[in-house]
Image (cartoon, rainbow, N blue to C red):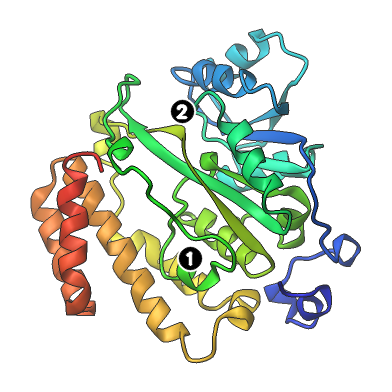
Amino acid sequence: MITAEEILELPAASRVVPAARLPLQVGSATSVSVVIPAKNVAAYVGETLASALAQAEVTEVIVVDDGSTDGTTAIVRAIRDPRLRLMTNGATGVSAARNLGAQHANGQWLLFLDADDRLRPGAVAALLAAARGAPRAVLVYGDYNTIDSEGRQIGRRDLLKGRRKPSGDVLARLAAGNFIVNGGIALARAEAFRAIGGFDVSLRYCEDWHCWCRLAAIGEFEFAPNLLLDYRLHTANTMNAAVRTPQDFFPAIARVFDDGLIMARLPAGMAAGLRQAAEVHLVTYSAMQAVRFGRYRQAFAYLGMVGRRSLKSLPRSAVRVALACFGI
């Protein structure tokens, strides 16, 4: 684990770290704050809140409204639960909304839940159980399944019995590609999250991946092999039109590999190879999303981009894209 002194020796642009919060303290803390950024999600936010408030281990749920113009805030205000708080963010973006919620959270662990997803029963309990077995972890995470706009299961990740993801020092693996995918499957230690400066508000996409990499640079991760979240993939035409291209994700790659905190912890000589792996990962992800929305020509074009970067990676990427057709 990187020390407080090592963080403070980095250039200021690489650390948004108040010295008073260091060194990080680890232990068996159990209070959990769920932070939910919300913008025009009246169709889903009630269900999302119900899934969070049903977790007995959750001590507070903070909804940060990011400039909704529908009935989102009215739905939140109508829910009578002393653990629920509503804040407003002035339409400054999802990262700023998450950071604001985290700034005012009282929990020793933070869970960033999207306002259209659902926590599965027992999700937080499973994460806390894993945290108790890994007292040095700054982030504990599990897995997810996917649902459609109507809440019907479309993923088949339950077929991947015994699938394992990395624990311990995961920075190199994580820099090669975001295997966490969704913050709703993770508990981040609040002190660690604040120490690395939260989410980078300058990034429009993959800001979570950059944040997880910074966390991995200062501590260990622990994987809990449970399906913890119903991750909603929208299939409506408006969402279909908004499918992202690889170019949308490349600024985040540049940010990760220009981050002094991350680069100081990566093994010497590995950055170039990890950067190429990250590009392959995100282009493959774009191809998988294109397949899910029926854009097969686009998916083939993205696989061509993979091949131009790494012929060795192409067969595995093609398999992942094919599995995406079946929700895996």
Label 1 Cα crowd, 10 Å radius (few <14 / some 14-19 / many 20+): some
Q: With respect to residue 293, does 237 lie above or below?
A: above
Image position, residue 50 (x, y; %): 57, 16
Label 2 Cα crowd, 10 Å radius (few <14 / some 14-19 / many 20+): many
Q: With respect to residue 323, does 151 lie above or below?
A: above
Which residue sits at x=53%, y=54%? 208
Which residue sits at x=46%, y=86%? 270
Depth check: give the residue in front, 17 or 22: 22
Image position, residue 236 (x, y; %): 26, 28
Q: Secondary structure at mark 1?
A: helix
Residue at label 1?
174
Camera-near label (2 vs 1) is 1
Image position, residue 291 (x, y; %): 17, 46
Which residue sits at x=81%, y=61%? 24
The three-letter code of the residue at mark 2 reads Asp
Which residue sits at x=13%, y=41%? 294
Mark seen at residue 116: 2
